[in-house]
Image: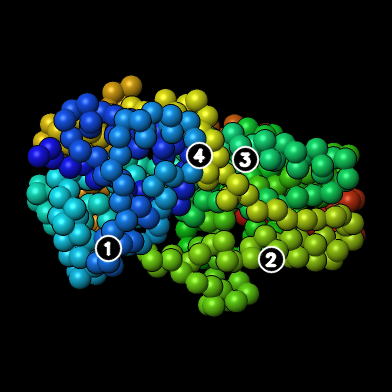
């Protein structure tokens, strides 16, 4: 009987998942393997309940590569949350006859795959294909994670529409973008759309972030924009700032649910509403009239039809995962470097201090960020010096000295 390759998808959806499933299926079958798709990620494997599967054929895979969503669905179940869960997961895989396993997912799915590979010691060959619209996995050559380019493109189109609405109706939008740890998606969408500014967690010093610092950036941008003769704009804020803000500053945060990996469900934190209300209050305090609304962007991006880049990218990743496994490999993340498949050992991705997969953050010292920052409308230290200071203060009910004190921008890491 032919060896069996099992494929599963974990974590949130990302455009391009079906491209990996399709190319891995076709390459595996052409190499003599039987392919089983596992529905709902690790969920049934970890629970030890009957696992919902489907035997995949080339006909099944032939045309799904350009479709959005996940043919095999997905879940956020953590197979390594404890020893018993890990053992049930491995036992379930062995009961399916899985000789090889391809896990398509982000940092948490990759972490679970690393534990399976470590525990089975080659009995089950494990490969992970990295996907996340957050673009926060440490891939070689700073390559994007698949799904990011599609999410950035779709998100930029939404922001462009909001910019036109803001101009037409003379208002401001605070757009909260997905991005738990990294501000890459927020920055990428803002840059591509020409948003007024973006605020990402990487630009602030380490440690707990005072939400007032974010409010000050946003309110300052509104005032500076008014001084330039424009009463409208769009600010994009990465949702990951929530993880840097003290719980006391977030209404009801203690009651927000957490996922299987212990993360606060950021979608349940009303950060957009909180920032909108605080910015409105701050502007009113300074005598500035402005209509400020908020908009969340995230779920619209995850199951979008992949752009050509992600279709092509995922085809190579799926093929590379199968070739890696058939050549005797196990325990690696499949990446591309210079157009070539490059397996990266999963243990090399783990942060020794946290035991978790390392997070790739936006490098705010790189030209890519510096150029983006220079094109934003934000208060900078030079703005708080004459003669610009007088123009800015004139937009408010503050004198120059008070304005400079209230809007002192502090030190931004660069």
Residue 112 place in picture, x, y as percent = 27, 56
Q: Answer with mark 4 or mark 3, whichever residue precedes in sequence.
A: 4
| Element carrying mark 3 | helix
| Element carrying mark 2 | helix
Label 3 with label 1: CB-CB less than 8 Å: no
Look at mark 2 in the image and give the residue it sits on. Answer: 274
Total labels: the figure holds: 4
Look at mark 3 in the image and give the residue it sits on. Answer: 155
Q: Residue at x 20, y 59 (%)?
A: 92
- Mark 2 Cα within 10 Å, few/some/many (few <14, many 20+)? some
| Element carrying mark 4 | loop
C-alpha distance separating marks 2 and 1:
43 Å
C-alpha distance separating marks 4 and 3:
15 Å
C-alpha distance separating marks 3 and 1:
38 Å
Label 4 with label 2: CB-CB less than 8 Å: no
Look at mark 4 in the image and give the residue it sits on. Answer: 68
């Amino acid at each position: 009987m032919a060896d069996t390759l099992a494929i599963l998808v974990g974590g949130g959806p990302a455009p391009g998942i079906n491209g990996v499933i399709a190319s891995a299926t076709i390459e595996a079958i052409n190499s003599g393997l039987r392919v089983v798709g596992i529905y709902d990620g690790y969920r049934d494997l970890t629970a030890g309940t009957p696992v919902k599967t489907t035997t995949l054929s080339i006909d099944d895979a032939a045309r799904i590569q350009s479709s959005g969503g996940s043919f095999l669905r997905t879940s956020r179940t953590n197979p390594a949350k404890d020893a018993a869960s890990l053992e049930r997961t491995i036992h379930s895989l062995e009961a399916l006859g899985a000789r090889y396993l391809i896990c398509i997912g982000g940092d948490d799915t990759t972490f679970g795959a690393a534990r399976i590979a470590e525990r089975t010691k080659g009995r089950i060959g494990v490969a992970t294909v990295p996907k996340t619209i957050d673009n926060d996995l440490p891939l070689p050559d700073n390559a994007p994670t698949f799904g990011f380019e599609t999410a950035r493109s779709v998100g930029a189109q939404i922001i462009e529409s909001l910019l036109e609405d803001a101009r037409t109706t003379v208002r401001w939008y605070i757009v909260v973008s997905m991005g738990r740890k990294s501000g890459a998606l927020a920055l990428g969408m803002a840059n591509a759309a020409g948003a007024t500014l973006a605020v990402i967690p990487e630009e602030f010093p380490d440690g707990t972030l005072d939400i007032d610092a974010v409010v000050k950036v946003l309110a300052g941008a509104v005032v500076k924009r008014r001084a330039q003769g424009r009463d409208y704009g769009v600010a994009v804020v990465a949702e990951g700032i929530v993880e840097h803000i003290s719980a006391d500053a977030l209404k009801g945060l203690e009651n927000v649910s957490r996922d299987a990996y212990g993360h606060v469900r950021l979608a349940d934190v009303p950060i957009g509403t909180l920032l909108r209300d605080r910015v409105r209050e701050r502007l009113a305090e300074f005598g500035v009239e402005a209509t400020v609304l908020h908009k969340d962007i995230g779920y619209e991006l995850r199951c979008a039809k992949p752009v050509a880049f992600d279709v092509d990218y995922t085809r190579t990743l799926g093929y590379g995962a199968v070739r890696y496994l058939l050549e005797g490999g196990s325990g690696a993340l499949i990446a591309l470097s210079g157009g070539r498949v490059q397996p990266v050992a999963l243990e090399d991705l783990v942060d020794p201090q946290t035991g978790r997969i390392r997070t790739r953050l936006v490098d705010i010292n790189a030209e890519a960020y510096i150029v983006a920052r220079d094109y934003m409308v934000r208060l900078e230290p030079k703005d708080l010096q004459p003669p610009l200071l007088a123009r800015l203060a004139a937009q408010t009910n503050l004198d120059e000295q008070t304005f400079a004190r209230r809007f002192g921008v502090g030190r931004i890491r660069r």
